Amino acid sequence: MESNSLDKYSLSEILDYKFKKLLEDLNCKSNNHNLYEILLNIFEESLLKAVYSHAGNNQKKSAEILGINRNTLKKKLVKYKII
């Protein structure tokens, strides 16, 4: 994978920036966003895709990397239409 300008920032720094930007964008709208659930779903889907790909689409290996049960992983992969 090629190095790019984001490589100089930690994941935490990137997330902090994006969260602040998202909150600024939502500021002028209603307060009923369910932001916690939305962000958890986005983060979980991205994490699952990355780990599943890294593990060669192997559910057992992916579950081990994530530290979750393989059946739980499979349900989440189906939920996000990864498999």
Image (cartoon, rainbow, N blue to C red):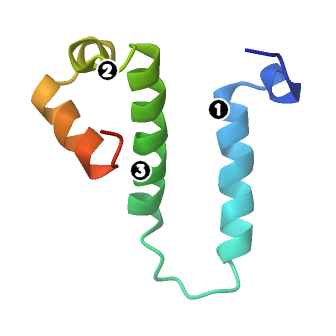
Q: Nearer the viewer, residue 5 or 83?
A: 83
Residue that carries the numbered disc 2 in the rendered image: 66
Q: Nearer the viewer, residue 56 or 43?
A: 56
Distance (Cα) linking label 2 and label 3: 15 Å
Which image quadrant: the C terminus?
A: top left
Q: Earlier in the sequence, mark 2 or mark 3?
A: 3
Report which quarter residue 30 is drawn in: bottom right
Amino acid marked by disc 2? Leu
Residue with the most extreme right position: 5
| Residue 58: image location, x then y, percent | 29, 16
Q: Is residue 64 above or below residue 48?
A: above
Residue under numbered circle 1 = 12
* Residue 3 rendering spot, x and y as whole percentages: 83, 16
Q: Earlier in the sequence, mark 3 or mark 1?
A: 1
Q: Tell me which amino acid carries mark 1.
A: Ser
Residue at the image position 74 percent from the left and 59 percent from the top: 21
Query: Which secondary structure lies at badge 3?
Result: helix
Q: Is residue 27 left or right of residue 37?
A: right
> For the residue marked with disc 3, what is the amino acid?
Leu
For the residues carrying marks 1 and 2, which lies nearer the camera in this image? 2
SS for dot 2: helix
Image spot of residue 18 (x, y percent): 70, 50
- Image quadrant in which you'd find residue 51: top left
SS of the residue under disc 1: helix
Q: Which mark is residue 40?
A: 3
